[in-house]
Image (spheres, rainbow, N blue to C red):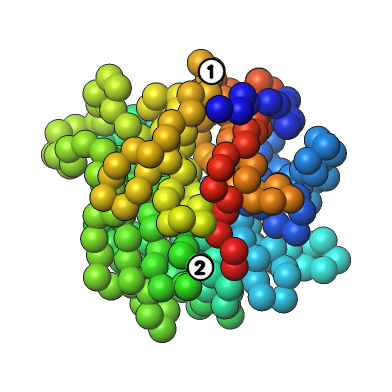
């Protein structure tokens, strides 16, 4: 098993990594910047997002979409580098936006917290939002527990969503911009009671955060509760696990020249009050046997 090695360090909190055209793109949450990183560690700041960047994806014409978390907007990076509003989701959701996945046709699926995580508020289920390529937005599914990392199958027919608070990955059938036929793709534990009060995570519980799909249809899961990456088959069987050597892991992506580099965003904590003014988060990488899917 190949060891982890550091790609870049000195981040506030890296999230939502995506491999695109030979570089790894990611959001550095509390530094309010979107970065593009080459495999030799070269870094370019692509955009600065004052209201905190998160999920990333690309329209068919190559323009980058960026989640602006706090003001609940999707921004579009124009060819001249300026950021323009692509969609305003503030009328659809009441909490921070989160991760996003963008399909080949430019349709985006966007998650949100559903409650004030940093304040320890009682959790509530929330919705997944669909944003059309022209910026029109609507609720696509509801009743999700902290929809987090997402992936789309190469044929474009299935969206897989990590529901961090529900201890599971859920899958939806995609057809003509709608989500249907919801099913549990993999379950890691019991579903919590929404009336039980503030979140209390049992020791050792699997917390699926960021995810990515590989060419065999398995999903790599960043387990934020146990400092490890899991390769999971549909149904929940754990095929492989990689410990991140004592540091928390919150997101992952497959990329590199042959698609076999597994990148992971690691940090000592996700809590803003603990890491916002520090620079001890990093992106590490290792080699795996199965590459990312061919699109």
Quadrant assignment, res 276: top right
Coordinates of residue 101 in the picture (x, y in percent): 52, 60
Q: Across the whole image, how many numbered discs are drawn on residues?
A: 2
Task: Write down the quadrant of residue 252 in the picture.
Answer: top right
| Contact flag, marks 2 and 1 (Cβ < 8 Å) | no
Q: Nearer the viewer, residue 99 or 85?
A: 99
Pinpoint residue 154: horizontal percent, then vertical percent.
Answer: 51, 68
Residue marked by disc 2:
154
Q: Is residue 80 left or right of residue 164?
A: right
Say left or right for 69 vs 33: left
Q: Which disc is residue 131 wearing?
A: none
Q: Tell me: 205 left or right of 256.
A: left
Q: Earlier in the sequence, mark 2 or mark 1?
A: 2
- Res. 150 visible in picture: no
Q: Is residue 198 at all visible to an observer of this figure?
A: yes
**Residue 232, position in %: x, y?**
37, 44
């Amino acid at each position: 098993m190949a060891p982890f090695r550091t790609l870049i360090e000195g981040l506030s909190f890296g999230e939502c990594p995506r491999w695109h055209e030979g570089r790894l793109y990611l959001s550095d949450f509390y530094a309010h910047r979107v970065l593009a990183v080459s495999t030799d560690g070269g870094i370019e700041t692509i955009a600065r997002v004052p209201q905190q960047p998160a999920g990333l994806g690309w329209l068919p014409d190559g323009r980058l979409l960026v989640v602006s978390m706090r003001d609940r907007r999707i921004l579009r990076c124009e060819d001249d580098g300026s950021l323009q509003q692509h969609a305003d989701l503030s009328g659809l959701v009441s909490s921070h936006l989160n991760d996003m996945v963008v399909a080949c046709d430019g349709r985006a699926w966007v998650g949100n917290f559903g409650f004030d995580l940093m304040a320890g508020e009682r959790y509530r289920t929330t919705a997944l939002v669909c944003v059309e390529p022209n910026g029109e937005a609507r609720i696509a599914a509801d009743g999700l527990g902290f929809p987090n990392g997402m992936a789309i199958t190469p044929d474009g027919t299935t969206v897989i969503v990590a529901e961090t608070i529900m201890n599971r990955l859920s899958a939806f059938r995609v057809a003509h911009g709608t989500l249907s036929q919801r099913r549990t793709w993999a379950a890691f534990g019991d579903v919590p009671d929404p009336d039980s009060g503030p979140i209390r995570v049992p020791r050792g519980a699997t917390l699926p955060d960021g995810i990515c799909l590989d060419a065999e249809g398995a999903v790599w899961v960043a387990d934020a509760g146990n400092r490890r990456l899991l390769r999971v088959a549909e149904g929940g069987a754990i095929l492989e696990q990689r410990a991140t050597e004592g540091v928390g892991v919150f997101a992952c992506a497959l990329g590199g020249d042959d698609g076999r580099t597994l990148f992971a965003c690691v940090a000592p904590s996700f809590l803003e009050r603990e890491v916002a003014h520090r620079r001890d988060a990093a992106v590490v990488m290792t080699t795996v046997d199965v590459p990312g899917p061919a699109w």
